[in-house]
Amino acid sequence: MTKLQDIKDKLENKYISLASVTPDNKPHAIAAEINKVEDGKIVITNNFMKTTIENIKNNPNVSLVLIEGENGWKINGKAKYYDSGKWLNFVKSLETNKRYNPKGAIVIDVERVEELG
């Protein structure tokens, strides 16, 4: 099985599909940029994700998909949303966020990484 560290360089600063679960158990997918893999967690900045944040607060299960050429990976995990503290300060400090005013950070504890194809 692929480990998060094995694909860290492929994930950082890349756009992925992020799927959360709505309160009525329907999938909700968006495009999002992974900012960093930090402390074994995936960190995504919230700038404009109202529905996704509400979904994560109700149900932390998420799934991400990254496609790079003919290769792909699916990552499942549990997400938590931070609108203050260490993780918000972390995303605010990132160079890629200097032109935004981040509202929060989605931090994903990875449970499974699966290579597709």
Image (tube, rainbow, N blue to C red):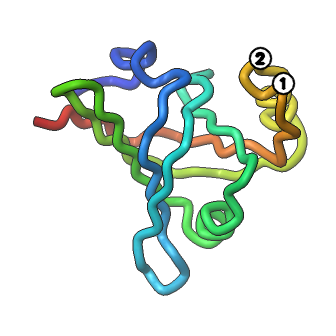
User: Residue tagged by mark 2?
Assistant: 95
Q: Amino acid at mark 2?
A: Glu
Which of 82/104 is in front? 104
| Disc 2 to disc 1: CB gap under 8 Å | yes
Q: How far apart, in angstroms, are the residues tagged by discs 2 and 1?
A: 5 Å
- Image coordinates for residue 6, horizontal then vertical, percent: 34, 15
Going 20% across and 32% down the picture, which residue do you hit? Answer: 115
What amino acid is at disc 1? Lys
Q: Position of residue 63 (x, y in %)?
A: 40, 51
| Frontmost residue, 91 versus 47 | 47
In the displayed orientation, state which residue is furthest to the front.
Answer: 99
Label 1 residue SS: loop
Say the numbered circle drawn on residue 29: none
Using the rendered view, name the quadrant where residue 84 is placed: top right
> Height in image: 45 above or below 55?
above
In the image, residue 27 lies at what x, y percent?
41, 70
Assess disc 2: are there few (<14), some (14-19) or many (≥20) residues with their C-alpha within 10 Å of its C-alpha: few
Between 17 and 7, the one nearer to me in the picture: 17
What residue sits 45% from the left and 47% below the top? 77
User: Dot 1: few (<14), some (14–19), or many (≥20) neighbours within 10 Å?
Assistant: few
Give the number of the disc on residue 98: 1
Point out residue 42 in the picture as x, y percentages from the top left corner: 55, 33
